[in-house]
Amino acid sequence: WTSQVSATNALPEYPRPQLVRPDWQNLNGVWDFAVTARDAGQPGSFPLRILVPFPAESALSGIMQKITDQQRLWYHRTFTVPAGWSGRRVQLNFGAVDWQATVSVNGAMVGTHTGGYDAFSFDITGRLRAGGNDIVVGVYDPTDAAGQPVGKQRVDGGGIFYTASSGIWQTVWLEPTNAARITRLDTTPDVPGGVLDLVVQGAGVSGQRVHAAVSTGDTKLSVVDGPVGVHLRLPIPDAHLWSPDDPFLYDLQVNLTGPGGGDAATGYFGMRSIGKAVVGGVLRPVLNGRFVFQLGTLDQGFWPDGIYTAPTDAALAFDLRQQKALGFNTVRKHIKIEPARWYYWADRLGLLVWQDMPSMRTGPAPSTSDQVNFEAEAHRIVDQLRGYTSIVQWQPFNEGWGEYNAGHVADLFGSWDPSRLIDPNSGSNCCGSDPGNGDVVDDHIYVGPGGPQPPTASRVAVLGEFGALGFRVPGHEWSPGNGFSVEMEPDLAAVTRRYVEITAALRGLVESNGLSASIFTQPTDVENEVNGLFTYDRQVLKVDAGQVLAVNRSVLTAALGGVVTPNTLASLRVTTPGFTDRYLRHQDSLAGTSVITTASGGTDKLDATFWLRPGLADPACTSFEARDFPGQYLRHQNSRVRRDPRDGGARFDQDATWCARPGLTGAGTSFESLNFPGRYLRHFNAEVWLAADGGPNPSDTPAGFAPDATWRVTTPWWRSGADLPLDTNRSFRVTTPGFTDRYARHQNGLGVTSVITAASPTLDKQDATFTIRRGLADGSCYSLESRNFPGQYLRHQNFRIHLAGNDGTALFAQDATFCAQPGPGGPGVTLTSDNIAGHALRHFAAELWIAANGGPNPYDNPANYAADVTWSVTDPWAP
């Protein structure tokens, strides 16, 4: 969009969509400019020219100069007030100026403002003269040399911090008003009450009253009259609710009427509710009373040509449109406040927004004055943004940057805006503190997704950052050759493979960890961070859009309990309130439900785990094969559901085939009988039946039918799909053709493969023998204890396999736990990592690694991957 910017069209759109007046004058364009010493007064001349509203450090400004704490910026321009504005007040509006601004008109000061992210205005009527008028704006911005909120700006950018944006960086404009004028429209939807709560904020009010009307199209829905500054209730009958799938917005017209004239403005709003609720036994964030998994990106809002300021409105909208097109429904606006039109586009396009506060600098603890300044600006920001429908969550701190008294600050935000969730410190697991209050517990795990903390009785669980898959695209780099990321990929295909792999792992976390949201780092490269889905210039999409969209949709569907993936293990959890700790299981050949917990025995967990096979009578549907009784399936017989061996008959196959349907409660999955349409898999009195809603049998009672016949397809209680003999010694032979005389072993503390024969030394045979133990981190998986070094286990560390003593930590237990699955390369088993999704024990160049198929490292090479991760479990070389 850079080429579309000129001196005459710099951001020409009306900048404040929630409070629109028809008459206005855009002051964006070329201003006179000067840079002086910090303590110098207004210069006598302005030798430079700058394109407003682009910050002085940006290329689009025409200045592109580093600004330090020892300098002050000066802006000057002339303007003429339109003749048609005669008799009205004139307001001079600034979208944002970073950081401390002094404004003069015709040589007289009209006001000052401190704060880099919130809008401000001055009534300049008394300073105007006929004909031409002068504006001078002086700006001081120390960036990270002082303690004000700066977000990721740094005077000397580098690493995860970026170029600063000093001075005017949002639109400047004039507009005429009456003496009594509207300054803000605070709209809060009350969905349960069926009304819009409206507070019209004003200035210069002397007896005027509010007249407000809600409409959609040409249809007026409701009106209200009342005082300025109080809560007014506008009925919204049969409200059309706003959501990411249906971002419906209402129109709002507000007038001030009364003595001396008034004011008029238009705005908009969406009807939606935000809250927390226990859904299927787990505390979740709910939108309009329903759990919607919030799948988002870490959107930093930086641009190579404008830094903080997008070159055009189309560019501003582009990032949001593309994220929506890739299947995301959420954006975390990362430690930056955007211009009003960004939030307008989020409202219009249908994206949930988590709004970070711009953080103070890292390092020095905030002083008392810094804290007072932070809270004052944050409060103004919350007030300024409270009317945007898309914003669902406030985040005062990120990873402890500039953090102080986080619990107190979280409570402050909750008092300022009780209608949204509060996330006290995003990434408290890695940095800063977790004050324990607020509505959200938020982990950052790179690359992840790892095992985020579960929710508590009062806080929902989210993964506030994960990902960071990097690749440099030649010709589209900020500093060629210097781009970095947490994990660099070898090519663009690998970026897609890894994105799909780590995102698919979220599906299990929705159930196993109670995860309710995830934020991927990040939608675009930013300066030398090359971990974007797009390059920094937005010209190259670095992933396959179809594959990203498909896996993103699968996560959203899984969160509703609706993913049935063939030939995978799963458990089915009851969704009926009061019984959500129960799972479908078989016992003595009959199907029922039982309470299953982490403390349950192995038999119970096995009985509650099933292979989801393509339907025996229709592969588009599902058959449930017992994990611990291969070849036996759940089928209905005389309406009772039982486990029986497949007998080869067509009737059995039909009775054992169930078709997944959207859950009858609107969430989860219901399973309809293939051969008895309208009848579903239902639990009733701890038994499982084939039942109809209101049929002739006791199990058909309509009371509770929908939740009883709705199930959550969850992570299996028994995670291994193949069995290994516990507490026995075994050796693991390579199955890759040409290397089948090699065995896994340890040598000098590292995992390797070696040729082992009957003639091999005793030590080699012992090193190639392991005692199979229950998994240290999960009893449904396995750990491999050294035959000749008791108490030492194979574990991965930085992906390499080591032999190490158990240090008792949770991390060691996870690193030393592997789940056995049928080998993808033929007969044998594969040993998958317990804690790094998509990775399995592989031999590569005679070394042992945990590897991904097509990941970023040499040992992830997809050639021979299936054979290399398939092992033959043999008699031990050292019994």
Image (spheres, grey):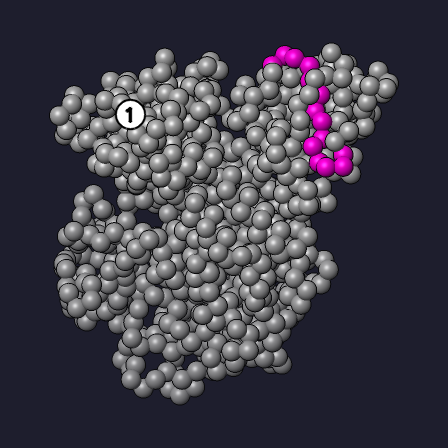
585 in relation to 409, above or below: above
> Farthest residue in the bottom direction?
131
Q: Position of residue 785 (x, y in %)?
A: 69, 17
Residue 425 visible in rendering: no
- Residue drawn at x 54%, y 18% is 779
808 in relation to 448, above or below: above
**In magenta segment, residue 318:** no
- Where, by quadrant of the figure, is residue 536 drawn? bottom right
- Residue drawn at x 40%, y 64% is 341
Residue 317 visible in rendering: yes
- Where, by quadrant of the figure, is residue 305 drawn? bottom right
Q: Position of residue 199 (x, y in %)?
A: 25, 54
Look at mark 1 in the image and give the residue it sits on. 636
Q: Which residues are magenta?
A: 726-739
164 in relation to 684, above or below: below
Q: Position of residue 186 (x, y in %)?
A: 29, 55
Question: Does residue 645 appear to the left or right of 451 in the view shown?
Answer: left
Count of marks, rendered view: 1
Question: Does residue 233 appear to the left or right of 179 in the view shown?
Answer: left
- Residue drawn at x 74%, y 15% is 787
Nearer to us in this view, 225 or 455 = 455
**In magenta segment, residue 733:** yes
Question: Does residue 113 appear to the left or right of 697 in the view shown?
Answer: right
Q: In what quadrant of the picture does the C terminus appear?
A: top right
* Disc 1, SS: strand
- Residue drawn at x 62%, y 56% is 492
The amino acid type found where label 1 is placed reads His
Nearer to us in this view, 486 or 460 = 486
User: How dense is the environment of label 1, judged by Cα within 10 Å: few (below 14), some, or many (20 and up)?
Assistant: many
Q: Position of residue 852 (x, y in %)?
A: 63, 41
- Where, by quadrant of the figure, is residue 674 drawn? top left
